[in-house]
Image (tube, grey):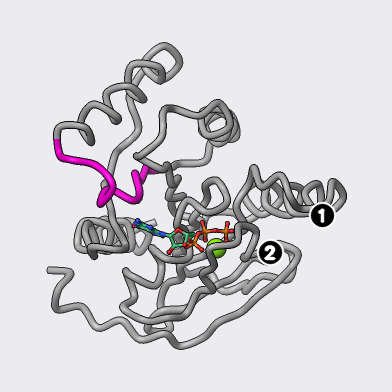
Amino acid sequence: MAEKINLTVTNFISNENVILCPQIKQPEYAFIGRSNVGKSSLINMILAHKIAHISSTPGKTQLINHILINDKWSLVDLPGYGYAKLSKKKKAEILKMTKNYFQKRGIQLVSVFMLIDIRIPPQKIDLEWMEWLTNNNIYFIRIFTKSDGLRKSNINKAISQYNKIMSTKWEKIPETLITSSKNKEGRNNVLNKIIELNKLFQNI
Ligand code: GTP
Ligand code: MG
């Protein structure tokens, strides 16, 4: 299904405030996660296009970036959280901008992709963000990134660790996808999810 889909980037719009973001009611999918988790890399991998800015220095993405596909739907590249080296003021500004985006965007924000680095143990800050999304009624799917760093058995172990912790707070564990931008793994799973949700959005 996803392999045949034509993905043309038809616009790229960067904003520092949710109220300035495109007003047209088309579905969009936002990527959030710790700085350096691989948000921009995953977007580029999915689109097979170097469109989002990638850097080994965390804190590269600082705006709300709408990447419009086929004039129909968007991927939204957001700044990461948890990057210690930005100034306190800049961090607070970015956090406010991002949370505002989630709370004020409205129904066109169909789903958030919550990126988690599979190579490291469960992080408090990631769990807190997932709780925040849930408390704000924002639907999200977990994407475990950088799976190239682990064997299959350890991938399952890492996800089980998260599920164990999350099952104390979540009645239903959020959906899970596994990706590696390095090995181009998981692209079809993400795209199929987007295609499925795009259809649901059309039916609203
Ligand atoms: P910010 O914009 O700072 O929030 O970071 P980001 O989440 O957009 O991360 P970005 O895509 O810029 O990638 C950060 C670093 O991780 C870069 O050095 C990437 O090459 C590396 N990286 C991204 N995806 C993968 C992956 O799947 N596997 C491996 N091994 N490295 C990856
Ligand atoms: Mg980025």
The image position of residue 113, as x and y in percent, is 42, 50
Name the residue carrying label 2. 62
Disc 2 marks which amino acid? Gln
Rendered residue at 52%/41% (across/down): 138
Disc 1 marks which amino acid? Lys
Rendered residue at 55%/72% (across/down): 66
**Residue closer to the observer: 145 or 111:** 145
Q: Do the residues bearing badges 2 and 1 touch, measured as CB atoms within 8 Å?
A: yes
SS under mark 2: loop
**Is 28 above or below relative to 85?**
below
Q: Which residues are magenta?
A: 141-152
Residue found at the very far right of the displayed protein? 89
The image position of residue 158, as x and y in percent, is 29, 29
Q: Residues within 10 Å of mark 1 (few under 14, many from 20)?
A: few
Q: Is mark 2 within 8 Å of ligand 1?
A: yes
Residue found at the very far top of the displayed protein? 168
Mark linked to residue 90 = 1
